[in-house]
Image: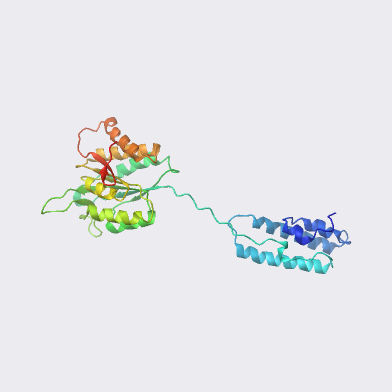
Amino acid sequence: MLPNYRSLTDLLAEGHPNVIVHALGLHSTAQTDDRFQRLLAALKISTAEHVKRLNRPHQNSQELERERYALLDRLKMFVELFNLDGFAVEEKALPHPTVQMKEKPVRVPLVLFLGSNPEAMGRLQLDSEYVKVTQQLQNKQEVFQLRISPAVTRETFEGSLAEQQPAIIHFSGHGLGEATGFRKAGLVFEHPVNRNKGDIISAKALAKIIKTYKEAFTIRLVVLNACESTDHAREISCSGLYAIGMTQEVLDRRAIVFAAGFYRGLSVMPDNIPFAFRAALDSFGIADVQGGEAVPKLFLNGAEVTV
């Protein structure tokens, strides 16, 4: 038997839906009135289920509020039907639903692999390089995501940046040094119409695009695994991020070995880019890649970083 000074409203407000059974058990005909028992049991179940739903995450607060008012009306009708003196049902008898916000998921840094291989420039083993990068990161999904944008053009480059918001941009393709009176230096993107032609992007234009998007999200590093790309890397790094470029013509095997070594190092120390760069340089000796062509250079704030 509950103390007489405890009201139904107070007990419900304290989160005790089952108290209806005890409180209304004070009714003199509770044990013999079948209708009383049926209605009491239905109220008990409805109230208990409502309180359970209040405690579940990501709830629909409007639906719960409608349910709350309907349940309060049923309680009032029950009290009036059986003339239960002293058990006035007020709105505070059941708590208002509160919206439980979803926790914002932790964003895993993304590596965006950009490939460009115009047919007239000579075929590169971009697939092999991408496979090597994937192999180094495949067991580190909680540390890095990897996305690929093949046959990248100016338009798809900016679109990929805006959509994917990468922490690391990896370009694999052709780079060209300046030939006076013939062409300007730049990275060779795919032509949007003619796959045989390349579309040369200057260092200044590329750096400007990356600087713009860096204001919207964090870009930590740009890797230019392409011939004669050090000027691009230096220019890009002036925005306060790391950038890697190649000094000369880079052969396929050397580019692939460098990429594998770099991401192997990054998988070990995700926040230490100089360490990953040093691991990539060491991989040349391990893989017995001879020759000093296409020496990789690491830049930050427009200056070469010595590792």
| Quadrant containing the C terminus in the rendered view | top left
Along the line of sight, the residue nearer the viewer: 300 or 69: 300
Residue drawn where x is 71% and y is 66% of the image: 91
Q: Is residue 182 left or right of residue 255?
A: left
* Number of disc labels: 0
Residue 33 x/y as whole percent = 86, 62
Q: Is residue 277 left or right of residue 51?
A: left
Along the line of sight, the residue nearer the viewer: 207 or 264: 207
**Colour scheme of the rendered structure:** rainbow
Q: Is residue 87 above or below residue 105?
A: below
Residue 195 x/y as whole percent = 23, 55
| Quadrant containing the N terminus in the rendered view | bottom right
Q: Is residue 275 above or below residue 126?
A: above
Residue drawn where x is 64% and y is 63% of the image: 64
Look at the image and tell me whether residue 42 can be seen: no
Residue 57 x/y as whole percent = 59, 55
Look at the image and tell me whether residue 275 can be seen: yes
Question: Which residue appears farthest toward the left when viewing the image?
Answer: 181
Q: Is residue 32 left or right of residue 274?
A: right
Residue 255 x/y as whole percent = 26, 40
Along the line of sight, the residue nearer the viewer: 44 or 34: 44
